[in-house]
Image (spheres, rainbow, N blue to C red):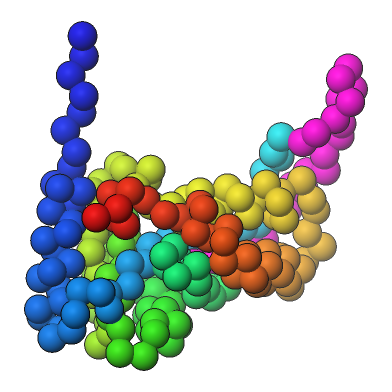
Amino acid sequence: MRRPREPSRILKKFPARLDEVARENAIDVGKIEIWFQDEARIGQKNKITRRWAKRGTRPSAPQDQRTASTYIFGAICPKQGKGAALILPSCNIEAMNLHLAEIAKAVAPGAHAVLLVDQAGWHLSARLLIPANITILALPPKCPELNPVENIWQYMRDNWLSNRVFKSYDDIVDHCCYAWNTLVDRPWKIMSIGLRQWAHGF
C-alpha cells in the first residue's frame, strides 16, 4: 500500500507563518487577508474547450491562426470573495509592480495581505516594489494545484474566453476586462473556487 504523500512545508507551517507576519506588522492575525496571484496569457491562437452538444453531432468551433495576445495579471482573496487584476501587454517585473500596487488598493484599510505566488522570476525579484500592506510568500515549485487562480483561469476560459475568434488586440483586452469584471461581480464564485482547507481551514 502506497504511503500518503507528506504535505509540503508551506502547508504544515502556514499558520505559524501567518502569526509571524502578524507580529512583524504589529497587527492581529485576524486582520491578515490571504491572496493568491498568477498570470494568464490570452490570445488569438485560442483554446477550444468542451461544449454541450446533441448526442451524435460534432459541433464546430472557430480557431484563429493570428498571434496577438495579452496577459491578465489576476489575484483573488477567496475568504472575502474579492479580486484585483490588470490587463497588460507584457509579463515582467514592471508589470508585476503595477499589479502589486493594484492589489494593495484592494486590501481592506488596516488589514495586511499575504500574497501567495509561484516561483516565476518576476514574482520574487529584488527589484519588486512591494507595498507596505503586502507580504509575498512563494508556493513550492511544481505545485500549481496549490494556487486556486489556476482554477479561476479555467473557469474564465470555459465561460468567456475560449471557442471564439478575437478581431484585434483591443478586442482581446475588451473580452478580458469583461470576463474579469463579471467574475468579481460574483464573489460567491471566487469563494467556491478559491477557498482551500490548508490556507483557510484553521
Please identify the residue farthest to the top as the structure is shown: 1
| Residue 3 occupies quadrant | top left
User: Relative to the observer, which residue lies in front, 93 or 162?
Assistant: 162
Q: Compared to 22, does 58 lie above or below? A: above
- Residue 64 within the segment the image draws in magenta: yes
- With 117 as the anchor, is 81 left or right in this view? right
- With 161 as the anchor, is 10 left or right in this view? left
| Residue 26 occupies quadrant | bottom left
Residue at horizontal 65 percent and vertical 50 percent from the top? 157
Residue at horizontal 25 percent and vertical 87 percent from the top? 132
User: Relative to the observer, which residue lies in front, 69 or 48?
Assistant: 48
Residue at horizontal 38 percent and vertical 62 percent from the top? 36
Residue at horizontal 20 percent and vertical 48 percent from the top? 11
User: Relative to the observer, which residue lies in front, 2 or 143?
Assistant: 2
User: Relative to the observer, which residue lies in front, 88 or 25?
Assistant: 25
Residue 50 appears in the picture as rendered? yes
Residue 46 appears in the picture as rendered? no
- Residue 141 within the segment the image draws in magenta: no
Q: Compared to 79, does 107 lie above or below? A: below
What x and y, as percent, mark residue 178?
71, 69
* Secondary structure mostly taken by the magenta-highlighted segment of the chain: loop
Q: Compared to 190, does 115 lie above or below? A: below
Magenta span: 51-75
Which quadrant, please, contains the C terminus? bottom left
What x and y, as percent, mark residue 29?
20, 74
Which quadrant, please, contains the N terminus? top left
What x and y, as percent, mark residue 156?
63, 55
Q: Compared to 59, does 188 lie above or below? A: below
- With 147 as the anchor, is 89 left or right in this view? right
What x and y, as percent, mark residue 123?
31, 66
